[in-house]
Every structure is written in structure tokens, then in C-alpha cells.
């Protein structure tokens, strides 16, 4: 019997990607990783495909802007961009919302990615 881990699930992966995209937005806009407000995270679970696509549209510009800040912000932006590239699904994903269990896994993935950034760059994460 194969054990399925939460970390391998669709919701968790979408949460991880969402956290990386939100992190890049924060690095570009203010030089800090600012967690999304709870209502924004909740809304992202309704259609993670569309929310991620919306944030991906500006990720190149945000990378450029964050890199121009120099120092730790520029270094963090490189890592976050690599995370975005790694976390974008490599296969066609359903474009529907997440059910209750997957939405909880989304939040777990989101929080785990933010915790990893906080561990790496405590001074840059609110």
C-alpha cells in the first residue's frame, strides 16, 4: 500500500507556489516578504490556477525590480525565482477550486514555504 503524503498533493503544491509568488511580489514592492492577508490566501484556494497565473504575469518584472535593490533582497529574489520555476506544475492541472481538505493542504504548503523563507532570511520576512 502506497502512503500518500500531504506534501505530494495538489493543494500543498499550489500553496507552495502561491507563497513563492507572494514572496516575489513583496521583495519587488518593498524589499520584504510580506505574507498575504488571510482573506487573500483563502480566495486563492477557490481557483489556485487563475490566481497563480495572475501573479506569474508580473514575476519577471518583479524579479528585475527586486534584483535592483541589491544585497540580501537581490539574493533572496534569485532563490524565490528558482522556487517559482520549480513549483510551476509540469503538467496540465485542473482549473477548478480546491475542496476543503485540499484547501487546508494549500494553507499548509503556503505556511511551510513562508517558514522556509523566514528561516533563510529572518530579516526580510514580516
Image (cartoon, helix red, strand yellow):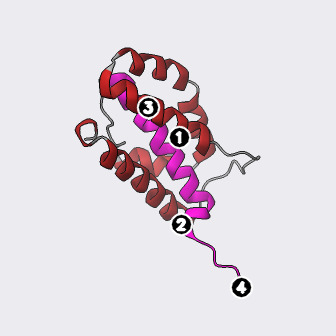
Which residue is denoted by mark 3 in the rendering?
24
Quarter of the rendering occupied by the N terminus: bottom right
Looking at marks 4 and 3 on the same chain, the residue that comes earlier in the sequence is marked by 4
Distance from Cα at disc 2 to Cα at disc 3:
27 Å
Mark 1 surroundings within 10 Å by alpha-carbon count, few (fewer than 14), some (14 through 19), many (20 or more): some
Residue at image point 31% right, 49% down: 119
Q: Secondary structure at mark 2?
A: helix
Q: What secondary structure is marked by label 1?
A: helix
Mark 4–mark 3 distance (CA, rounded to whole Å): 39 Å
Residue found at x 33% / y 44%: 120
Say whether residue 57 is left or right of residue 33. right
- Give the residues in magenta: 1-30
Q: Which residue is mark 2?
A: 100
The answer to whether residue 98 is magenta is: no
- Whichever of labels 2 and 3 marks the residue nearer the N terminus, that label is 3
Decide which of tag 1 and tag 3 comes sooner along the chain.
Answer: 3
> Circle 4 is placed at which residue position?
1
Q: CA distance from mark 2 to mark 4?
A: 25 Å
Query: Residue 66, which numbered label?
Result: none
Amino acid at each position: 500500500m502506497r502512503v500518500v503524503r500531504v506534501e505530494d498533493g495538489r493543494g500543498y503544491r499550489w500553496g507552495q507556489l502561491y507563497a513563492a509568488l507572494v514572496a516575489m511580489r513583496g521583495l519587488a514592492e518593498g524589499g520584504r516578504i510580506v505574507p498575504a492577508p488571510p482573506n487573500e490566501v483563502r480566495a486563492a484556494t477557490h481557483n489556485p490556477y487563475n490566481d497563480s497565473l495572475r501573479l506569474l504575469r508580473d514575476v519577471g518584472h518583479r524579479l528585475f525590480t527586486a534584483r535592483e535593490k541589491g544585497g540580501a533582497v537581490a539574493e533572496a529574489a534569485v532563490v524565490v525565482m528558482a522556487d517559482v520555476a520549480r513549483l510551476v506544475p509540469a503538467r496540465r492541472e485542473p482549473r477548478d477550486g480546491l475542496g476543503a481538505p485540499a484547501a487546508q493542504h494549500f494553507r499548509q504548503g503556503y505556511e511551510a514555504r513562508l517558514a522556509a523563507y523566514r528561516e533563510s532570511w529572518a530579516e526580510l520576512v514580516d
